[in-house]
Image (spheres, rainbow, N blue to C red):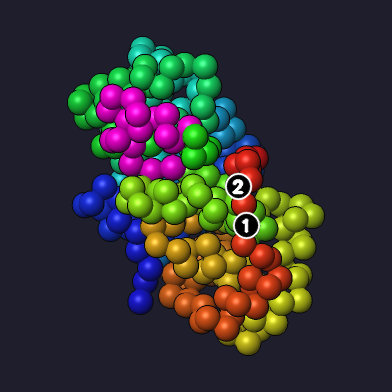
Amino acid sequence: MTKTVNFSGNSLLPAIGQGSWYMGEDRTRRKEEVAALQAGLEYGLKVIDTAEMYADGGAEEVVGEALQGRRDSAWLVSKVYPWNAGRVDAVEACERSLRRLKTDYLDLYLLHWRGNVPLEETIAAMESLVQAGKIRRWGVSNFDSSDLKELLAEEGGTACAANQVLYHLASRGIEYDLLPECQQLAMPVMAYCPLAQAGRLRHDLMTHPTLVQIAQKKSITVAQLLLAWVIRKEGVIAIPKAGSLTHVAENAAALEIVLNSEELALINQAFPPPTGKTPLDVV
């Protein structure tokens, strides 16, 4: 059974979407990136996540190209720089994103991380974008528990529809407080880099003996195991980037993978859950 996440009480979405970080940086890969996003939509990976920061808007352009004639198949997320999150600037930044994405609305618009613009001003900007029909809902990214508490205390702050944070097997800090708090609020958590960053850490996960053993036993890849692990919790959606058609197919198949209690116990043994508060990991 395909794992789903409920957004704002009326959007039931597959618990694995598509990320676009690093897309749009190399023009020679554009056709491949567009094809991968379109294949993801065909597999039902509706959520596509991007940001004005990624390749200075280049990723949004790739996504926009991929969505031509397919906008209704996607649930589109973009993010605004913190210094563009003021009353006027956020509206202008959103309009620039919409032009690059070749669409007239976003399903979700996120504050990329907290900056110096007062939260009340960002909330006002987001709400004005909702009223104008340019975004359906808004949320935040890289907000720890204390940031979220401040946000919710602001007038209109409870309209926040999601929190996008770093979450993968080697970075479990949010499980101590932030994830339970978001679950209590019925606020979906979007896990970016669910397979860990490229480089040493990712390599260590992909070759870890426990993970390799479990994956082999289930006839899946370690990457699929890691995705299935991230979305095992209620209200968590993973947004891995897939630059190839093979990876897209693997990601989509991970929606059906269920880990049993014995497998989860082995994983916990190798990668223990947090026993106390840790600062939010950010990359």
Mark 1, secondary structure of its residue: loop
User: Could you say which quadrant of the image residue 16 lies in?
Assistant: bottom left
At which x and y percent is residue 74?
34, 50
Q: Are marks 1 and 2 in contact (CB under 8 Å)?
A: yes
Count residues near mark 2 (Cα–Cα under 10 Å), then give few for <14, some for 14-19, many for 20+.
few
Q: Eyeballing the image, is 109 above or below 275?
A: above
Q: Which residue is mark 1?
A: 274
The kind of residue on which mark 1 rests is: Pro
Mark 2, secondary structure of its residue: loop
Going 23% across and 51% down the picture, which residue do you hit? 9
Is residue 31 something that shows in the picture? no
Magenta range is 147-163
At which x and y percent is residue 158?
30, 35
The kind of residue on which mark 2 rests is: Lys
Q: Eyeballing the image, is 117 above or below 255?
A: above
Q: Which residue is mark 2?
A: 277
Asked if residue 89 is among those painted magenta in the image, a careful observer would answer no
- Give the left or right position of residue 182, taking residue 145 as reference: left
**In the foreground, 175 or 111:** 175
**In the foreground, 89 or 153:** 153
- Give the left or right position of residue 3, taking residue 260 as reference: left
